[in-house]
Amino acid sequence: MDAKSEVKAIVFDVFGTVVDWRGSTIAELTSFARGRGLAIDCTAFADAWRGLYQPSMEEVRSGRRPFTILDDLHRESLLKLLDTFGVTGLGAHEIEHLVTIWHRLAPWPDMPGGLERLNSRVITGTLSNGNIGLLTRLAKFGRLPFNVILGAEASRAYKPTPEAYLRTAAILNLKPSELMLAAAHNGDLAAAAATGLRTAFIVRPTEKGPSQAVDLKAEQAWDVVTDSCHGLATAMGCAM
């Protein structure tokens, strides 16, 4: 039997796979800075902010700090970067506006329609390190028709720890082999596959910018390899 035929739900990594975090963040930071006369390199700021993503979560994964939602980690990282880039004098409402940039990231163009097609056959949802409030607003902003929004609070674990994948399957009343992770990151898929999940690689060659050097091709024999959510829907036997 084709392994894909056992799949009852597909959950998506979000940042980079579903949404263009880099392009969206740079655009919002540029608008914010221009409106306030701030002379900062918004591309460098966006990349540095994302660069603090994994280190901030590692503090939680390692047990050095209690579970903390991503909105709070993003806020802490932002405050560090404002100091590094010499940005001072912002009000609390301006800080909150910047933190919630991550609630307003534009989806890749293939995502809304591809999800609609997948919804005809399987449950669709998120398996992200984002928190539920963030992801719910992100889905609403991008008109993304997920059936279920699951954030890191659901598993109380950050990927790539095994609990993040296994607890998501359990929450959906599924065996690991009945759940597929769709992601643009080989490392995420490898961690998911190690727990028994099915895997789909969606290449996003510009996620990290024009000089991206990683995740440009599948590094293992994933169950599905494609360049769009529509390609995944076709591979799963969904009608146009």
Image (cartoon, grey):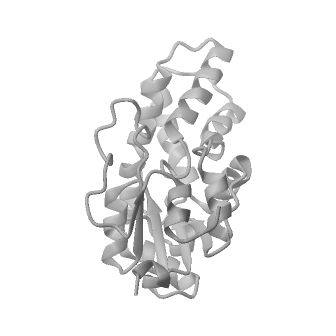
The answer to whether residue 117 is above or below residue 204 is below
The answer to whether residue 153 is above or below residue 35 is below
- Measuring 50% from the left and 72% from the top, which residue is drawn there? 156
Q: Residue furthest front?
A: 240
Q: Could you say where residue 49 lies in the image, as x and y percent from the top left?
A: 45, 37
Q: Could you say where residue 238 lies in the image, as x and y percent from the top left?
A: 60, 69
Q: Could you say where residue 91 lies in the image, as x and y percent from the top left?
A: 68, 29
Viewer can see residue 127 = no
- Measuring 46% from the left and 25% from the top, which residue is drawn there? 43
- Measuring 46% from the left and 68% from the top, which residue is drawn there? 181
Viewer can see residue 72 = yes
The answer to whether residue 144 is above or below residue 238 is above
The answer to whether residue 169 is above or below residue 132 is below
The C terminus - image quarter: bottom right
Number of numbered markers: 0
Compare residues 160 and 59 and report the one nearer the observer: 160
Direction from residue 107 to residue 156 in the image, left or right: left
